[in-house]
Amino acid sequence: MSSALATPPQPTSPAKAAQPKLTNNAILLGGCAILLLAPMAFGAVEPWAIFALEASSVALAGIWFYRQVVKGELDVSDHVLYRPMAAFFALGIVQWLTGITAYRIETYTHLLLYAAYGMLVFVVTQTLRRSSQFELMAKLFTAYGGLIAIFAILQGMAPNGKIYWIFGLQQGGFIYGPYVNHNHYAGLMEMLLPFPLVLAATPMTNGNRKIIAGAVAALMAASIFLSGSRGGMLAFVVQVLVLGVLMLGKRNSGWQQPLMLGGFVALVIVFLLWMGGNELTRRLASIHSEAREEISGGVRITIDRDCLRMFLRRPFFGYGLGTFPIVYPQFRSFYSMFFVNQAHNDYLQLLVETGLAGFSIAIWFLIMVFRRAAGKLANWTENATGALTAAALLGCLGILVHSCLDFNLQIPANAAFFYVMCAIAAGPPLQESQRRRVVRRHNLIVEPTAEAAAQ
């Protein structure tokens, strides 16, 4: 008869003790915190806010690297977007080093900013691995988007010409939420809105939680219209149409999802009738006349034409990252006392600043996003990978539509969010939980048995 010998507890090394504190979830939440705090700093357009975004991104990447050192191994997953992002960054370096850029300091500062975007994308793609993380992100983005929408609506109802009712504008603006420009607020909502919609459309929530997610999504959508952003309204309509196509094209499509989408649109209309008032009615009524004025020779169309003339002067490598406001005055074809700081069209500004070389890289980037995302959308309401892909892709689509009319991708907070959403949409499938795998059968959520869970 033998007995087990008692062994003294082994001392825990400092490295092992530190490991639980630096989990993937903690680092991923750090990345989400950077993405969600940046809009609150006026969209991270001020020098101090840009520095904070860059410094926090470097710190987060350093924490991720430290965790690899603690683990004693370098665990790096490849991603299809790393190559086009690296190619674009290399183009900016070539512009800076060779003097192609019209202003080296401006290109250098933009390279630092793009490096911060790249670090955020890298850390999020390296730490977002499991379906439970997506559920956490979706709920976090839903709560955040709802709070920002409530704040923006309240500020719109009782404005005093200051952001947060405290900070005055140094120049003109159209304040909405934490942004000087209402169009940029709408851009943020376009990227956040799909997450509560996906929660409401999938089995990840049920009962009252579905209703709450749908109500928050309707509130966020209503705030886009209340902001008065025409580009935001157009982007939202496109997002709803694409979501409807995804629902109709889903395997085993039933009537619940289209009914949910119809209920969501109805709730948005109710919110607008309740809170919109005469100001919203006037804004909607003016869309046709303002659009006709722009087409017949408005300021934005004139800037677009000027951009094409700039592009033809330097078609291959452009004038350099970030140099549009410096170069544009010599090409401006209209009189104005205002400083034109952006092109109001992200695609044309990309052509002007990086030429065909940069524009080709951007097309490569977007092709990879949509190609990889399309392969994960089959039965997207039944698995976390498809739901995450649908939410991220709809958010990216909204900004891409809006970018034809505004410059959301020149706002650091919105640009950082956009690049991360693109990387998520094109990322590899998530690891489904073995303990709680949602299986859809006859519109029911079947929990795994105790025997299956033990496996």
Image (cartoon, rainbow, N blue to C red):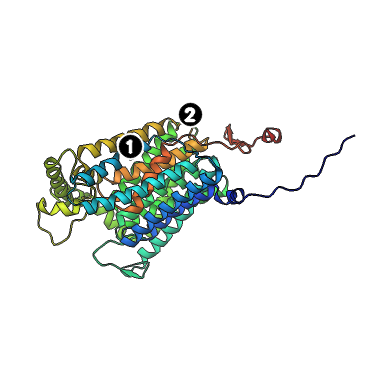
Residue 400: quadrant of the picture: top left
Side of 433 where 272 appears, left or right: left
In front here: 275 or 299?
A: 299
Tally of numbered tags? 2
**Residue ID for mark 2:** 251
Side of 367 where 130 appears, left or right: right
Residue plotted at (70% across, 36% down): 450
**Residue ID for mark 1:** 84
Q: Residue 181: horizontal and vertical position, in percent? A: 29, 58
Q: Give the answer, above or below, for where 252 lies relative to 319.
A: above
Element type at mark 1: helix
Quarter of the image where the N terminus is located: top right
- Whether residue 141 is visible, yes or no, is no
In front here: 208 or 332?
A: 332
Q: If you read the primary sequence from the N terminus, does the residue marked by circle 2 or circle 1 appear first?
A: 1
Q: Residue 69: horizontal and vertical position, in percent? A: 52, 45
